[in-house]
Image (cartoon, rainbow, N blue to C red):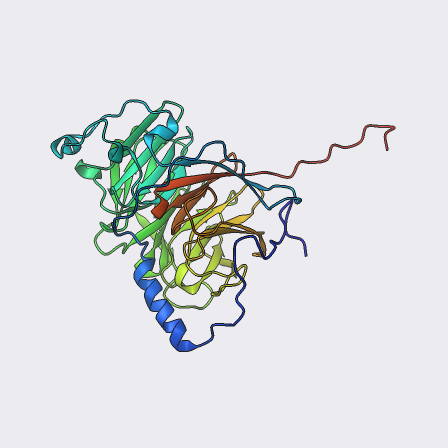
Amino acid sequence: MVHGPGLKKPMANNGLTDMKSARSNKYNLRIRCNVLIGALLLALGGCAAPPPPPPVKDVDLSWPLPPEAPRIRYVQDLSSREDIGGGDKTLSLADTILGKEKDDSSFERLRKPYGVSVDRSGRVLVTDTGWGRVVVFDEANNKFSFWGDSGKGALRKPAGITSDSLGRVYVTDAQDNRVVIFGPDGTFLSAFGKKGELDTPVGVVVNEALGRIYIVDSRHHRIAVFDMSGNQISSFGERGDAPGEFNYPTNMAIDREGRLFVVDTMNFRIQVFDPEGALLKTFGQTGDARGQFARPKGIAIDSDGHIYVVDAAFNNFQIFDSKGRLMLFVGTMGPQPGQFWLPAGAYIDENDRFYVADQYNHRIQVFQYLKEQAVPAAADGES
């Protein structure tokens, strides 16, 4: 079976345990689903957690394990201002009133990241449900900042995040049931989501060629489609488990052809649609075996069309080819590089860097997809 360029089906010791007995008992499944529904809507609450793991330097990790050629390489963690070289930060009026100090290290660190994206200038944008804000890592300018802490753009439970070619940043607020749009400098521009129009919006992507904003409308079990002015123009999906239906979907990715990859979380599958909402394919099912899902959350697509799915219960991410066949998986539970604790959102940038929001480790983990090198053609007269 072909599994895509350079990525092969994982061996049994790569971090996921095969299920030796099928969980077919309806009672157990019902209990499991009830527990997941409670946790599904993002684990967006603000439970306290232990301090983040100590910083790790000079780590050389790649997957799969030797002797196979590496295809995923660990790059770094982002968890605090120190990870981008420090730099001054400006406190908001609210933080000043609350007594925050510039040297308060707890203020300069992620609390509970959920969503992650990267804008055209290379800034890493993180929705943090612990802070109730967007956290911005601007490595090029050594700046660490917060957006959405006051005024019309104040956020309560930011979840999904993306940006467009003009630098505008779109953030879903799962508690206020709206989408907030910021300018490149974090200035509030506008918001949309009329009363009753959205219920727990999570994932968000933009198709600028079509002038559309797609929102995962989780509790309405559908994808809501808006124009660039924030007017709803259509939607697709309803609650159910038939193809094209949803059961508490959460996150979404868009590829270069405008296809939408939706994490249908409580149906334990990925559904793929064209830009008009026509179903193209589905893959995945519940279970503990390789290639199955327990609590799928984040999703991203690399430049070769591989599909990365983060699973919060497995504490890993799995990589599938375009047909939905498992190629590789990375991760176990823990605080070290390449380990996770209830990971959530994901993103791949234009350089094939893969970002994972590692919620209870209070960090973003960054990996690099290593494309297979093409073999140069032989010159004339060579064999």
Which residue is the extreme one toward the right?
381
Nearer the observer, 57 or 350? 57
Q: Is residue 375 visible?
A: yes
Q: Position of residue 155 (x, y in %)?
A: 23, 42
Q: How many marks?
A: 0
- Indicate the quadrant where residue 140 lies: top left
Q: Is residue 276 visible?
A: no
- Indicate the quadrant where residue 296 lies: bottom left
Q: Is residue 125 above or below residue 320?
A: above
Who's the residue at 48% across and 55% down the image?
Answer: 273
In the rendered image, the quadrant that contains the N terminus is bottom right
Who's the residue at 41% across and 45% down the image?
Answer: 335
Q: Position of residue 272 (x, y in %)?
A: 49, 55
In the rendered image, the quadrant that contains the C terminus is top right
Which residue is the extreme one toward the front?
54
Q: Position of residue 311 (x, y in %)?
A: 44, 54
Nearer the observer, 113 or 324? 113
Q: Is residue 307 above or below residue 116?
A: below
Q: Is residue 149 above or below residue 279?
A: above
Q: Position of residue 227 (x, y in %)?
A: 35, 45
| In the image: residue 354, left or right of residue 99 | right
| In the image: residue 317, left or right of residue 47 | right
Q: Is residue 135 above or below residue 88?
A: below
